[in-house]
Amino acid sequence: MNVLVTGGAGYIGSLTTLCLMQAGLNPVLLDNFSNSQPQVLDCLEQLAGRRPVCVTGDVRDLALLEQTLVEHSIDAVIHFAGLKAVGESVRQPLAYYDNNVQGSLVLLEAMRRQGVRTLVFSSSATVYAEASEMPLREDARLGPSSPYGRSKWMVEQMLQDLARSEPGWSLTALRYFNPVGAHPSGTIGEDPRGVPNNLMPYIAQVAVGRREALHVFGNDYPTPDGTGVRDYIHVQDLARGHLLACQQGHGRDGFHVYNLGRGQGLSVLEMLKAFELACGRELPFVIEPRRSGDLAAYWADASRAEDELGWKAELGVDAMCADSWRWQASHPMGYST
Ligand code: NAD
Ligand code: UDP
């Protein structure tokens, strides 16, 4: 099976590419390297024993996409390419609608023209509305609170409309909860540009000495220790979810949506403690006011993915922290070290 992986050089895309290669599939990457490094291709070659084909280009380039689909006889697409920082999306909404919505539109048009009908799309738990009942099921009320979340919701709606419009389309949206961790070898991991927005890479950079202390955003939430609770999922589990969605989606008509999470919440302080165990020392933290737009607690009901895809998260918080630390300790400055 030849699979086009847009955004395949990024954090989740690269580890999914490796998972596809190890399962005997043939991934073809397309990335503009706006948030990734070409060195990841060397790492993939080292781990998989062969180098994946990589097309350097933009997902909004219709001619390039059509050419890539034809040249590589693509059977299915996994679409990761896009921008992902919630705060930035509030400041630069047009960049998000352009990359995420327009990018998906162009990709779908290229697929329609070239008769490629299977797509797996990176959606997000941010599509759910606030104050929904926990755990979040796929049929919970939707209503994202940022341009980033709305861009994901818009694409889900496009996929739903397209699947309704004619038979033959197999379109799957995977709503990720909080992906963390790295490849267990420490060779591939998350390499955020600038100050990390997310908890796990920030903790990892404190552990490696790049940042002084973790800023804990709020300890007065209605949660057991007052800090925010999220459903963290190991990126290796997530990668396997894409493999299954791609293999099982192929030939199965319609629009399908799945939560990918562990179904368990973990607080900021619990995550910090788990990381301390992994790196073997205490990590400094300071309590700060709540971060605007943050919710107290949410986690997934991932039973639909288990029932229909046969997918269940296997790796726990110990593996998430150990693998993340192995990556950070061996690459203190990310891919540039
Ligand atoms: P990432 O930034 O590491 O990877 C995205 C990749 O897409 C990068 O390599 C980037 O260079 C590329 N890219 C961006 N715009 C492009 C364009 N217009 N054309 C071609 N390539 C482009 O991000 P990630 O964490 O691997 O996330 C992958 C996807 O998963 C994104 O769509 C993101 O919104 C979604 N997602 C991520 C998280 C998370 O916490 N990491 C959670 C939910 C959903
Ligand atoms: N968080 C924190 N300090 C940080 C980054 C995040 O306390 O430097 C908290 C944040 O308030 C939330 C949790 O960690 O409760 C997860 O945040 P993250 O940005 O990783 O993911 P989100 O769920 O917001 O997408």
Image (tube, rainbow, N blue to C red):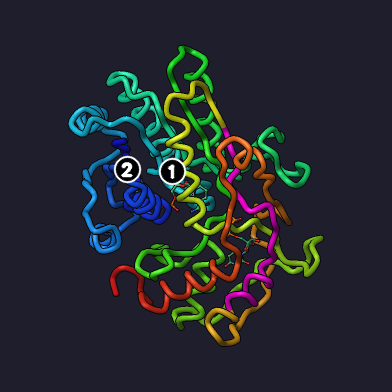
Write the start and end of the magenta stretch as one range. 257-275
On the image, the x and y values in percent for residue 227 come to 72, 66
Between 13 and 200, the one lying in front of the other is 13
**In the picture shown, does residue 89 fall above or below 156?**
below
> Is-magenta flag for residue 65?
no
On the image, the x and y values in percent for residue 176 come to 55, 47
Name the residue rendered at 52%, 15% in the picture: 164
Between 20 and 108, the one lying in front of the other is 20
Name the residue rendered at 36%, 35% in the picture: 77
Q: Earlier in the sequence, mark 1 or mark 2?
A: 2
Q: Which residue matches tag 2?
A: 25
> Is-magenta flag for residue 271?
yes
Count all numbered tags in the image, as a single digit.
2
Q: Are marks 1 and 2 in contact (CB under 8 Å)?
A: yes
Name the residue rendered at 47%, 31% in the picture: 249
Q: In the rendered structure, find residue 243 and report the number of the disc placed on it.
A: 1
Query: Circle 2: is it few (<14), some (14-19), or many (20+) Cα within 10 Å?
Result: some
On the image, the x and y values in percent for residue 40 come to 28, 60
Residue type pointed to by label 2 = Leu
Residue type pointed to by label 1 = Leu
**In the picture shown, does residue 314 fall above or below 259?**
below
**In the picture shown, does residue 139 fall above or below 325?**
above
Residue 130 left/right relative to 330: right
Residue 222 left/right relative to 30: right
- Ligand 2's image quarter is bottom right
Between 138 and 247, the one lying in front of the other is 247
